[in-house]
Image (cartoon, rainbow, N blue to C red):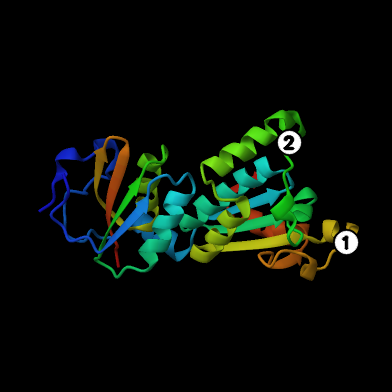
Amino acid sequence: MFGFDKRQQNGVPAGAPDAAAQPVSASVQADLATPPRLSIVLFSGTVDKLMAASILATGAAAMGMQVELFLTTWGVVAFRKDDWRTNTRVSSDYADYGPAMRERMAAKHVSSWMDNLLGAKEIGDVHIAACSMTMELYDLKLDDMEPIVDEITGVASFMHQAQASQATLFI
Amino acid sequence: MATAQVIDRNVDAKGQMCPMPVLTLAKAMKELQPGQVLAISATDLGAKRDIPAWAEKTGNQLLEIVDEGGVLTFYLKKSA
């Protein structure tokens, strides 16, 4: 049947040697029926934090989680149409790492945070909302934002999502 | 070394860094029929843990992991 000689013990789940189709466990079935949720408040607009947020969102989406990304303050600013193409901001404490970070990302063909999110939307359940407060503060309309932004909502909508989430992050 | 199983889809994720391997895997699995087998090769340091976690969470079956000098190849079967 299979050559299991080189199987890595700690990576293979119990019961794997059975080559026949394995029944899906109850907990997985429950997950597939009502997927666990991840809510992220994306307050930041620097590329280092946008990368972290996008990887978390993408990983969660790939795992079958329902992801709610709530953009606020600099997160809204970073999602304005085309802003991501020229955004090279890094957290000020690490400004000196900025050039090296960009260089390494280019050299290692790391996909951009926007590309990660586009991929996440394609394979999973990802909803991106922009904070109405910030939108109004900067006189922004949904049309001014990247198409990946689904709608404008407020804090109550986000809290509704967060209450139903297994994990809520502030980035 | 290689399994005797027919591989329905081969995915090369070598050189891809987190989150690309699981993203690439999720995308490829979508195109498979239940019961089909996919092989994905990855060099990402996190893949050894990430791909089994993905399989467990999504209810797909991880058949085997083969380690050849830093390249891990995961064999997965799509569940119903």
Across and down, in percent, residue B18 comes to 48, 45
Q: Quadrant of residue B50?
A: top left
SS label for mark 1? helix
Are the residues flagged by discs 2 and 1 in contact, CB closer than 8 Å?
Answer: no
Q: Quadrant of residue A85?
A: bottom right
Q: Classify mark 2: helix, strand or loop.
A: loop
Measured as percent of width and height from the top left, residue A16 is found at 21, 49
Asked if one can make out residue A170 in the rendered structure from this viewpoint, the answer is no
Q: Is residue A61 left or right of residue A135?
A: left
Left or right placement of residue B60 versus residue A52 in this view: left
Residue B65 visible:
yes
Q: Mark 2 falls within which chain? A: A
**Circle number at residue A136:** 1
Mark 2 or mark 1: whose residue is earlier in sequence: 2
- From the top left corner, tell me how far across and down residue A12 is, in percent: 27, 43
Task: Point out residue B80 in the picture as x, y percentages from the top left corner.
Answer: 30, 68
Asked whether, in this view, residue A154 is left or right of residue A163, the answer is right
- Indicate whether A91 appears above or below A58: above
Q: Determine the residue positioned at 51% across, 63% down.
A: A124
At label 2, which amino acid type do we have? Ser
Decide which of B62, B66 is in the foreground and name it: B66
Vertical side of B42 occupied by A124: above or below: below
- Residue type pointed to by label 1: Glu
Residue at the spot 75% in from the left edge and 64% down from the top edge: A145
Q: Quadrant of the C terminus of chain A?
A: top right
Mark 2 closeness class: few <14, some 14–19, many ≥20 residues within 10 Å: some
Q: Nearer the viewer, residue A39 or A112?
A: A112
Residue tagged 2? A91
**Nearer the observer, disc 2 or disc 1?**
2
As drawn, the label of residue A89 is: none
Q: CA distance from mark 2 to mark 1?
A: 25 Å
